[in-house]
Amino acid sequence: MTENQPTKSSSKLVSRPIARSISFVVRRGARLLTGARSLWTGCEPELKQRIYYANHNSHIDFILLWSSLPTPVRRMTRPVAASDYWLKDGIRRFLIQETFSGITIQRQGNQNSDPLASIKEALSQGDSIIFFPEGTRNLSDDTELLNFKSGLFHLSQQFPQVEIIPVWISNLKRVMPKGAFLPLPLLSTVIFGAPLTHSADWDKTQFLEHARQQLLELKQKELQ
């Protein structure tokens, strides 16, 4: 290595303040554009390890939820995002890895690998996560919530000590309609519910349906 070649550590020193600045702009911008309000109806924004699971309508869902967390909570919370979208180019890669400290996963994994491996590693290290159990964006106007994939169940089995918090994000289909590059200035609400309780005797189907119903019940609170 020559004197003129930057080291990885010096590159990190440059990228960190940039990432922090972008984080500030993104948080303020997301809340300004959406007029987002946060309702903690079933829990408090505490420094506890949690899995925040939410409905998924757009690529900015996790940004809005992440921005709704108080700074100390946000610093320990990592969004789970699709690698095929967020690793597509250098800008998105920088945003998800440096600005949001995100966990990228492959939605179409091969049979020999665990698609939840990177999420499990983060939870093992004490991080909280933002997780979308539908597995893909719900772009239907006729369906409130898609059926859940099995990931949330498997995480609950392996990490029973971690609180699982349902979060309903309202209005994002209109805030960020399909094909839009920037969000529209419409009001949105992020509603945090009570920690999920369930029976140890439930099978996967029972657990996922219960988790789904808890999320749908939160939707009613935006009308109150």
Image (cartoon, rainbow, N blue to C red):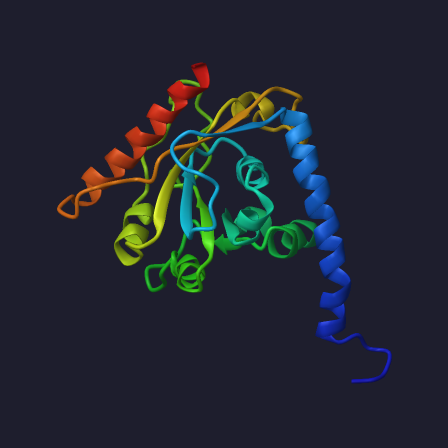
Looking at the picture, tell me which residue is in the foreground, 166 or 135.
166
Where does the image place residue 178, in percent across and percent down from the top left? 56, 27
Where does the image place residue 143, in percent across and percent down from the top left? 38, 22
Question: Is residue 22 found left or right of 58 in the rendered image?
Answer: right
Where does the image place residue 151, in percent across and percent down from the top left? 33, 48
Relative height, residue 126 to residue 100 (above, below)? below
Q: Could you tell me which residue is drawn at 22 percent across and 41 percent down? A: 198
Point out the residue furthest to the top here: 223
Question: Is residue 74 found left or right of 136 in the rendered image?
Answer: right
Looking at the picture, tell me which residue is in the foreground, 113 or 188.
188
Q: Could you tell me which residue is drawn at 25 percent across and 34 percent down? A: 209
Quadrant (top left/top right/bottom left/bottom right) for the N terminus: bottom right
Quadrant (top left/top right/bottom left/bottom right) for the C terminus: top left
Q: Which quadrant of the view contains residue 120? A: bottom left
Q: Could you tell me which residue is drawn at 57 percent across and 42 percent down? A: 70
Relative height, residue 91 to residue 4 (above, below)? above
Point out the residue furthest to the right here: 4
